[in-house]
C-alpha cells in the first residue's frame, strides 16, 4: 500500500479530533472522541489494506485500486464528519467522492482533452501573431520591449 494513503487516513483522523476538541470539555468526552476516531480510521486503513492484498490487487489494475482506495477515503471522511457533527469534514468527504468519477473521466478523456487544447492553441497563436504583426506594420511600437 502506498505511503500516501497510510499517512492521509490518520491525518484525517487527527483533523477530525482537532476540529471537535474545543467543543468537548471533559476528559471522558475527549478520550471517547480520540477512541472513536482511532477505531474509525483504523477500520478505514484496514479496508484500504484489503484492496492492496495480492489476491485483490491481481483482479484490478493500479488505477482502479487507487480509485477504490480514494472511494474508501471519501466514505471514511464523510462518515467521520457526520459522526463528529462537522459539516466541513463532510464537504471534504464529498469532494473526495466527486473526485473519483472525475478522475476516471479525466483518465478516459485525456487524449480528447489534449486534442482540444492543441486545436485551441492552433487557433489562438496565429490570431495573436497576426495581431502583433498588424501593430508593428501600423507603426506602433512593438508591445514586447527589446533588451539593450
Image: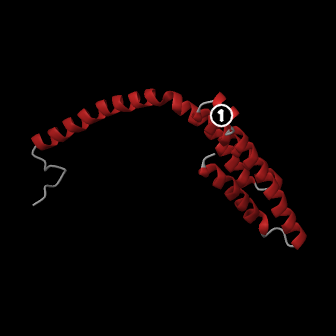
Residue furthest right in the image: 28
Q: Is residue 124 left or right of residue 33?
A: left
- For the residue pair 93 and 46, the one nearer the viewer reads as 46
Image position, residue 112 (x, y; %): 44, 26
Q: Is residue 101 above or below residue 47?
A: above
Image position, residue 94 (x, y; %): 69, 44
- For the residue pair 119 and 31, the one nearer the viewer reads as 31
Image point (13%, 55%), residue name: 146
Q: Is residue 21 above or below residue 73?
A: below
- For the residue pair 68 and 92, the one nearer the viewer reads as 68
Image point (88%, 67%), residue name: 29
Residue 84 sits in quarter: bottom right
- For the residue pair 130 and 32, the one nearer the viewer reads as 32
Image point (29%, 30%), residue name: 122
Image point (58%, 35%), residue name: 62
Count the marks.
Answer: 1
- Image quarter where the N terminus lies is top right
Image position, residue 133 (x, y; %): 15, 39
- Image quarter where the C terminus lies is bottom left
Q: Is residue 63 left or right of residue 55?
A: left
Q: Which residue is mark 1?
A: 57
Q: Give the class, few, some or many, for how many residues have Cα within 10 Å of label 1's Cα (few <14, many ≥20).
A: some
Residue 65 sits in quarter: top right
Amino acid at each position: 500500500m502506498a505511503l500516501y494513503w497510510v499517512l492521509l487516513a490518520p491525518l484525517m483522523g487527527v483533523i477530525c479530533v482537532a476540529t471537535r476538541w474545543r467543543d468537548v470539555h471533559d476528559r471522558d468526552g475527549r478520550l471517547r472522541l480520540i477512541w472513536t476516531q482511532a477505531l474509525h480510521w483504523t477500520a478505514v486503513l484496514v479496508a484500504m489494506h484489503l484492496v492492496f492484498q495480492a489476491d485483490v490487487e491481481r483482479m484490478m489494475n493500479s488505477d482502479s485500486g487507487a480509485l477504490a482506495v480514494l472511494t474508501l477515503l471519501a466514505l471514511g471522511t464523510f462518515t467521520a464528519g457526520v459522526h463528529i457533527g462537522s459539516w466541513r469534514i463532510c464537504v471534504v468527504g464529498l469532494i473526495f467522492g466527486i473526485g473519483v468519477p472525475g478522475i476516471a473521466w479525466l483518465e478516459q478523456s485525456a487524449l480528447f482533452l489534449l486534442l482540444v487544447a492543441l486545436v485551441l492553441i492552433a487557433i489562438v497563436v496565429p490570431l495573436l501573431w497576426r495581431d502583433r504583426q498588424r501593430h508593428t506594420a501600423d507603426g506602433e511600437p512593438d508591445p514586447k520591449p527589446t533588451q539593450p
